[in-house]
Every structure is written in C-alpha cells, then in structure tokens.
Image: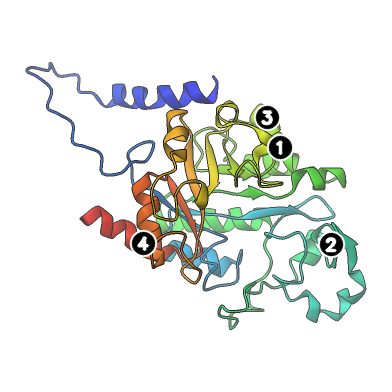
Amino acid sequence: MNRIAALVLAPLLASACSQSDAPQTGAAPDAPAPLWNTLDGLPPLVIAHRGASGVRPEHSQAAYQLALEQGADVIEPDLVMSSDGVLIVRHDPYLSTSTDIANRPEFTGRRSVLMGREDWWVPSFTAAELRTLTASQTMDDRDQSYNGQYPVMTFDDFLGFVAAEEERCACEIAIEPEVKLPAQFTAMGLDPLPALLASLDAHDLNRADAPVVIQSFDAAFLQRLNDASDVKLAMLYAGPDAEGANAGGLSLEEIAQFADGVGAYKSLLLTPAGDSTGFVEQAHDLGLEIHVWTVRDDREPLTGDTVQDELRALFAVGVDGVFTDFPDTAVAVRDQMAAE
C-alpha cells in the first residue's frame, strides 16, 4: 500500500472500529470543531531536539532524561557512523565542539582533514573509542557545568535507554532519529541503512506502527529506506533554494510518494507577521504531517516578541510537531492554548 493510501484509510478504519454495534436512531449530533489544526486534529507533538539540549549537553542521556521529565512527546537522536559501522548519536560528524576529545592526549594524533575541515572525525574512530568520550554543550552562551559527565552514546545505547524508561513508566516513548549525511558515509564504505535496520529489528521497531519516524535531508536515502522498511519517514526540508536541504528538488507531491511527513524549517510556514504561507495546508492536503524546526528559548523568535509568541503562531497554523531545545516551554504553551 502506498503511503498516501495508508494515511487516507487509517482514520476511516479507526472510525469503523470505534462505532457501536447498537442501533442508531435520530440525526447524528454535529461534531465539535477540532481544537487543533493538525492533520489528525490531535495536539501537536513536542519533540525534544537532541534532548533538552538547551540545558544539558546535546545527545547525552541526561538531555533525553530531562526532556521526558519536562513532558516531551518525542526525543530525537542524530545518527552518524563509526569506523566499524556502528551508529553513533551525534549531530556533527566531527567531534571537537560536542565532546571532550581535545582534552584527550591519546587522541591528539588522530586529527585529519575531511569535508574541508581539520578535526577529529567520528568515522575515524571505533564505537568503543567514541564511547570513552563525554558530551559537551555546543553553544558557548549556554550552561557548561554539565560538560564531561555523560558518555557519547551509540544508537543501541539510546534504544536501550528508551526501553528502560518505557518499562519504568509503563508507557510508550516515541523517537525521531535523523540519519546524517548518508551519502557521504556510504561513499566511505559505511552505509548507515543496514545498521539502522538491524538496530530497529533488535528492538522490535522495524514496523509501520512503531513509535518511530526516521528523518533525513537525503531524499535518495529515504527512498531506499521506504523500499526496505515500513517504518514512518520524514523528509527534512529548508526550501527550494537551500543547498543540501532542498529535498533534491522534489515537490511535496513527489515527497508524499515515499514519506509520511516533512520536517520543515519554520520560515517556510509563517511570514514574519505570523501569518500562514499556505505550506502547512498544502502538506496536509497531501496527507503529510509537518514537524517544524527549531524553536529555541534563547534565540530570536521568527515572529512575535517572545518564543511563546512564536510557539503560539506555529501551533495555530497547524503544525503536527515542534522541534525545540527547551521542551518545557513548548509543553507549557500548548497546555495554555488547550485551556483557552
């Protein structure tokens, strides 16, 4: 079944299953207007961008733990590849800005030039070596006091943490991994697709109804993944003129043939005045969810005077999820809007 057909049928099937077998009499009451303009009418998701990365080092277990405590609905790990083909939870393929590697004398001689930059690179180290490093806050104007405390995680470490948290809370925790630079890693002989599928299989997450969305800026990778798995997919997109982030020039109609959603940059959705550009509505008409990036309390908002204004505008336009470094703020704004 293609993805558009599945999205169209799913609400109908859910409705059919929920109907009472008792005879119905009289005219059906008018359904209440939906509170949210999301694709499914449900509250938009709060997605912890690299965990609660505004207050803990990104992609550390502490950042993910805090995000869950703050009420995030989804947590996001970025994935890169080690030299021995293991998925590592890091945003950047280089290590100087997000780890303590510069203070590790045993790795001094391991710097190299890759992708036009001299640095220490994830694909130059084994997973075992990388797991000896600790995470650091990447933004200088954020709290640095938690640096050096939390080991770099593999994707399997991350999935193990999620499984343990699910057992503790007796709940299901959704994840939204982003596969970074798959074409570049594949060119090095480190194709992330088999490793990704193996990890999902090992944790019973390689299925259409798993609480998982796989993201990438690489349309060809997502198309390959769509052929290999039924797991949900999101095409990351910053606009038609954004080099490396333009979905390979594909239209929304073409994206809808292999993806379930679009991870869109926020300026695609709203004007500076906070009005809709029509992008969300167009995507929803195609059955595509919109997860927007990235809202940060300590950065200038796209619209309005405060990050709360920005969040309200994004929620009002109908985004299905918001990536944020500060999940508690997004949860609070969503709760306020629901109560109004």
Give the quarter of the image for residue 154: bottom right
The disc label shown at residue 125, or none: 2
Secondary structure at badge 2 equals: loop
Callout 3, which amino acid?
Answer: Ala
Residue in the foreground of this view, choosing between 8 and 228: 8
- Name the residue located 50 percent from the left edge and 50 percent from the top edge: 292
Callout 2, which amino acid?
Answer: Phe
| Disc 3 to disc 1, C-alpha distance | 11 Å
Query: What residue did someone put label 3 on?
Result: 228
- Name the residue located 20 percent from the left edge and 23 percent from the top edge: 20
Q: Give the number of callouts.
A: 4
The disc, 4 or 3, on the residue closer to the chain's N-terminal end is 3
Secondary structure at badge 3 equals: helix
| Disc 2 to disc 3, C-alpha distance | 28 Å
Instruction: Say whether marks 2 and 1 touch (CB < 8 Å).
Output: no
Residue 70 seen by the camera: no
The disc label shown at residue 221, or none: 1
Query: In the image, 240: left or right of 7?
Result: right
Query: What residue did someone put label 4 on?
Result: 309
Instruction: Say whether marks 4 and 2 touch (CB < 8 Å).
Output: no
Mark toward the viewer: 4 or 3: 4
Q: Position of residue 189 (x, y in %)?
A: 87, 44
Instruction: Say whether marks 2 and 3 touch (CB < 8 Å).
Output: no
Mark 2, Cα crowd under 10 Å, few <14 / some 14-19 / many 20+, is: some
Callout 1, which amino acid?
Answer: Phe
Mark 4, Cα crowd under 10 Å, few <14 / some 14-19 / many 20+, is: some
